[in-house]
Amino acid sequence: MSKALVSQYGAGLLMLDDALRKGQDLGLWISPAPVAPFWQIGYHALFYTDLYLCADERAFRPWPGHEPSWPRLGDLAVAARAPELASLLEYTAALRSSLTTRLSALDPDSPAGFEWIPFNRGELFIYTLRHLQHHTGQLAERVRHAGGPPVSWVGLDLESEV
């Protein structure tokens, strides 16, 4: 199961990477939108993927340069500045390179580790993958709406350490 999770998390992160690059190329990075700017949706997806791959909230260390408003979406999303694309691509790559170690350290049958999550770690793995793909899909739709090329579908990640 761990190899499958590493591959699918890696594939999801590669798709997010592609969406971020294409959005930047189309000038969407800081474009306003009903929910949040393009970059902020990407950061939100990375932040929560990173958080939920930790044993618990105490074990979590935000990405260097993190600002508290960045992962928030909706009415609370008031960011004074946007990170550069390169920074989010580094974050994506760092998450991909840590997948094997992090996923193998977490027991799918154990509690989720977060008091607000009502299910076990195994279900949290799936929940987090759905969350990552949900926001990647939002960004992919914005790219297509702006006339950009489709975000590449990645079925599995053969390059992550599996």
Image: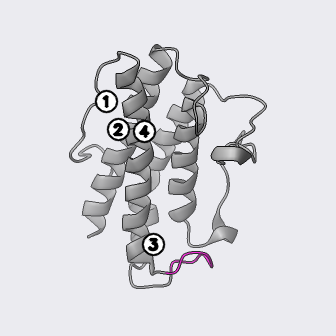
Q: What residue do we see at 28% from left, 26% from top? A: 150
Front disc: 1 or 4 = 4
- Residue 162 quadrant: bottom left
Task: Report whether 162 appears left or right of 116.
Answer: left
Which residue is more in the foreground, 161 or 79?
79
Q: Report crowding for label 3: few under 14, some 14 to 19, many 20 or more residues within 10 A (C-alpha).
A: few
Q: Where is residue 10 in the image (x, y as percent from the top left)?
A: 35, 48
**What is the distance, in whole Å, between disc 3 and disc 1 at their CAs?**
31 Å
**What is the distance, in whole Å, between disc 3 and disc 2 at their CAs?**
25 Å
Is tag 3's residue or tag 2's residue first in the polypeptide sequence? Answer: 2
Q: Where is residue 133 in the image (x, y as percent from the top left)?
A: 37, 48
Please provide the residue range marked out in magenta: 112-118
Which quadrant of the rendered structure holds the N terminus?
A: bottom left
Q: Work out whether residue 72 can be spotted.
A: yes
Is tag 3's residue or tag 1's residue first in the polypeptide sequence? Answer: 3
Instruction: Look at the numbered discs 1 and 2 and tell me whether their residues touch, using CB distance below 8 Å.
Output: yes
Q: Where is residue 103 in the image (x, y as percent from the top left)?
A: 41, 66
Is tag 1's residue or tag 4's residue first in the polypeptide sequence? Answer: 4
Front disc: 3 or 2 = 2
**What is the distance, in whole Å, between disc 1 and disc 4 at their CAs?**
11 Å
Q: Mark 3 points at which residue?
A: 105
Relative to 124, residue 5 above or below: above
Is 70 contained in the magenta span?
Answer: no
**What is the distance, in whole Å, between disc 1 and disc 2 at their CAs?**
7 Å
- Residue 31 quadrant: top right
Circle 2: residue type: Met
* Local secondary structure at mark 3: loop
Q: Mark 4 points at which residue?
A: 138
Circle 1: residue type: Val
